[in-house]
Amino acid sequence: MARKYRTFSADFKLNTVMEGFRGEKSIAQICREREIKHVLYYK
């Protein structure tokens, strides 16, 4: 059985990174809210 990976739109990626740059929330909090791993955020 093949594993299915989630794909993220460019808009989702940009919004996630920009939210981190604003500094209003911690990276951990952003990742929890968007249900992604912190390693994925830094990639």
Image (cartoon, grey):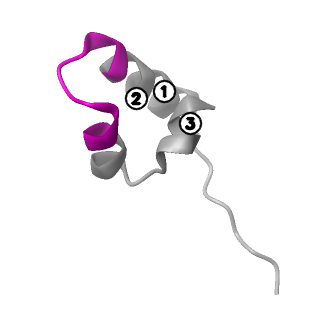
Looking at this view, name the residue that lies furthest to the left: 24
- Amino acid at circle 2: Thr
Quadrant housing residue 21: top left
**Percent coordinates x, y for residue 7 in the rendering:** 62, 49
* Residue 23 quadrant: top left
The image position of residue 8, as x and y in percent, is: 57, 43
In the picture provided, is 4 more to the left or to the right than 21? right
Which label number is shown at residue 9?
Answer: 3
Residue at position x 34%, y 22% in the image: 20
Mark 3 vs mark 2, foreground winner is 2
x and y percentages locating residue 26 in the rendered image: 25, 31
Circle 1 is placed at which residue position?
11
The kind of secondary structure element at disc 2 is: helix
Q: Which residue does the image show at 17% across and 20% down from the upper left?
A: 24
Judge from the rendering whether residue 32 lies leftward or rightward of residue 40; answer left or right.
Answer: left
- Give 8 or 33, whichever is nearer the viewer: 33
Question: Which image quarter is the C terminus in?
Answer: top right
Q: Amino acid at mark 3?
A: Ser
Who comes first in sequence, dot 3 or dot 2?
A: 3
Q: State the separation of the CA atoms marked 1 and 2.
A: 8 Å
Q: Is residue 14 magenta?
A: no
Query: Where are the magenta residues, as a range?
Result: 20-30
**Disc 1 on helix, strand or loop?**
helix
Distance from disc 3 to disc 1, alpha carbons, whole Å, reads 5 Å
User: Circle 2 is placed at which residue position?
Assistant: 16
